[in-house]
Image (spheres, helix red, strand yellow):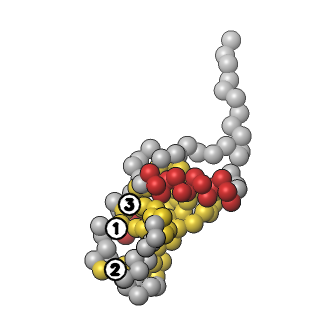
Amino acid sequence: MSTAAPPISPTAKASKSTRPSPVKLTDRAASEVRRIIANKQIPEGYGLRVGVKGGGCSGMSYILGFDKQREHDLEFAEQGITIFMDKRHGLYLMDTSIDYHDGLDARGFVFENPNATETCGCGSSFAA
């Protein structure tokens, strides 16, 4: 008597990547992302999109927001948070750390990118 495996649902999601994430979230950043997910009721299937785009005073700007997975995305898990990143952005973001500051002089997410050869004064754009 053979037992067949149960059918796989067409909506079943592939497992998350086991490769190390090219970006790291500090404890403060992960905590703030979780707070936003809960407060803004981010739907299932959305993850934290991290990327870059052309523009800004130094040539490139960071992307950070919630989005669904796209065709060229890699998926990572960092501190239990799903991260989506276009695989073409990995070169610019490898080993980048994302922190969250909540102080009198600065508030928001801060990127610490070892690949940046130049940054602007506000820290939201860079050159690589």
| Residue that label 3 marks | 97
Q: Is mark 2 on a helix, strand or loop?
A: strand
Q: What is the x, y in percent for residue 91? A: 36, 67
In this view, the residue farthest toward the top is: 1
Element assignment for label 1: loop
Name the residue that disc number 2 marks.
119
Image spot of residue 82 (x, y percent): 54, 52
Which amino acid, by three-letter code, is at mark 1?
Answer: Asn
Residue type at the position of mark 2: Thr
CB atoms of marks 1 and 2 within 8 Å: yes
For marks 1 and 3 on the same chain, the one whose residue lies earlier in the sequence: 3
**Separation (CA) of disc 1 from disc 2:** 10 Å
The residue positioned 66% from the left and 26% from the top of the image is 5
| 3D distance between C-alphas at marks 3 and 2 | 15 Å
- Crowd tier of the residue under label 2, counting other residues whose Cα lies within 10 Å: few below 14, some 14–19, many 20 or above: some
- Residue 23 is drawn in which quadrant? bottom left
Residue 113 circle label: 1
Q: Earlier in the sequence, mark 3 or mark 2?
A: 3
